[in-house]
Image: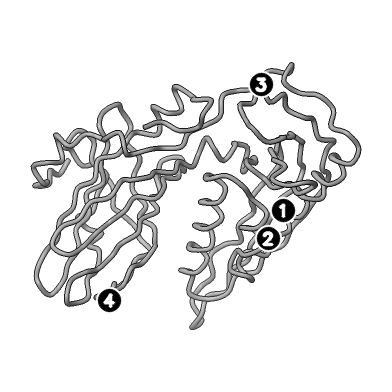
Amino acid sequence: MRRLVLPPMLATLALTACVGISGPRAPLASTALAPAPGIEEATARAAAIGFIQAYAQAPRDGGRALSAAVDGPLLSEWAHWLAVQNSHFPGSIEGAATITSVGVPSTLDPSKSGSDQPEVLLDVQASVSFTYSPAAGASPPPPQVRSLNGPMLLAEVGPGEWRVRDFTRDGTPLDLTMFVYTGLSTAKQGVTVRLANVILAGSVWQFGLVVENGTSGPIHLDTSVTAMVLDGTPVTGRAQTTFGTIEPGTTVEGFVSLPAPQGPGQPAVFLRFVGAGGLIDLGMPFQDPRQVLASPSPSGALG
């Protein structure tokens, strides 16, 4: 394995109490469920259908309908970053929804769900598919189909107004694959990077980052050196990114995909930016989302 010269603080910097990570809800027992009244059933099912349709049309409307169909920090973050992901594609994306069935909602017992708003759980059999048409005649990537088969959680945020708080994507609840971080950022030589979220995608972890270029010139990310680091040792594999040139005085949202760490230890992201003034190296330790998965919190947040 190659070893990088990392900032000295990388091995010692600990996550402070102001840093949070949202994790999975505690599992619900069957005794926490009861049939929903008729009016709630109809409006909740309509909201679930609206969410699926909004997911499919997100590339067309910039995710506006999808953002209006969700509730809570996790789903709001996911909807926003889906729009960011779509915006980075150099061409057009067409989405389509296929809805086979939307089941009868079951009301969750507030004393067991931990929510102060009415919530229902229903079963969905549906999918969304996306077809990509790159600009400039490039070869298109294969179509993507997302299975939504499985439970969907909705909350009543106002009288008769239901929004989705969690759903199943490709066989796994979103709250077991996406983790939202708050208060975690690092800065050096005029460049500030904030870690917004991490998505676990098998052998790859995808980091949603916000980069502010406060230097006097453009910068770009050097993917040949940028790496996932575990206990100070880079994980083998090359980074991929949606970030291009970041102009001075701008703030850009984008993704960096890195090989997932395979063992226990303190993970960190090492980023190298290159500008007219030279190299800018930043190290950002973060709480391992696998620890959150091992100890689900009913509150959905750990600090």
**Mark 3 Cα within 10 Å, few/some/many (few <14, many 20+)?**
few
The residue sitting at 45% across, 22% down in the picture is: 295
Reply above or below: 278 against 301.
Answer: below
- Residue at (65, 21) in percent of width and height: 112
Q: Nearer the viewer, residue 199 or 161?
A: 161
How would you rate the neighbour count of disc 2 (Cα within 10 Å): few for under 14, some for 14-19, many for 20 or more?
many
User: In the figure, 235 relative to 297: above or below?
Assistant: below
Which residue corresponds to mark 4? 247
| Figure quadrant of the N terminus | top left
> Do tag 2 and tag 4 residues touch (Cβ < 8 Å)?
no
Q: Which residue is mark 2?
A: 56
- Image x and y of residue 268, in percent: 25, 41
Q: Left or right: where does residue 187 sit relative to residue 144?
A: left
Q: Residue 14 placed where, x, y %?
A: 21, 34
- How far separated are the C-alphas under marks 3 and 2? 35 Å
Q: Quadrant of the C terminus?
A: top left
Q: Earlier in the sequence, mark 4 or mark 3?
A: 3
| Residue 228 location (% of width, % of height) | 27, 44
**Closer to the N terminus: mark 2 or mark 4?**
2
Q: Which structural element holds mark 1? A: helix
Instruction: Give the mark, 3 or 2, whose residue is nearer the N terminus.
Output: 2
What residue is disc 1 on? Answer: 52
Q: CA distance from mark 2 to mark 4?
A: 32 Å
Residue name at image x 65 percent, y 69 percent:
94
Calculate the distance from the C-alpha at mark 4 to the C-alpha at mark 3.
51 Å
CB contact under 8 Å: marks 2 and 1: yes
Amino acid bearing label 2: Ala
Identify the amino acid type marked 3. Answer: Ser
- Reading the image, the residue beneath label 3 is 111
What is the distance, in whole Å, between disc 3 and disc 1 at their CAs? 29 Å
Circle 3 or circle 1, nearest the eye: 3
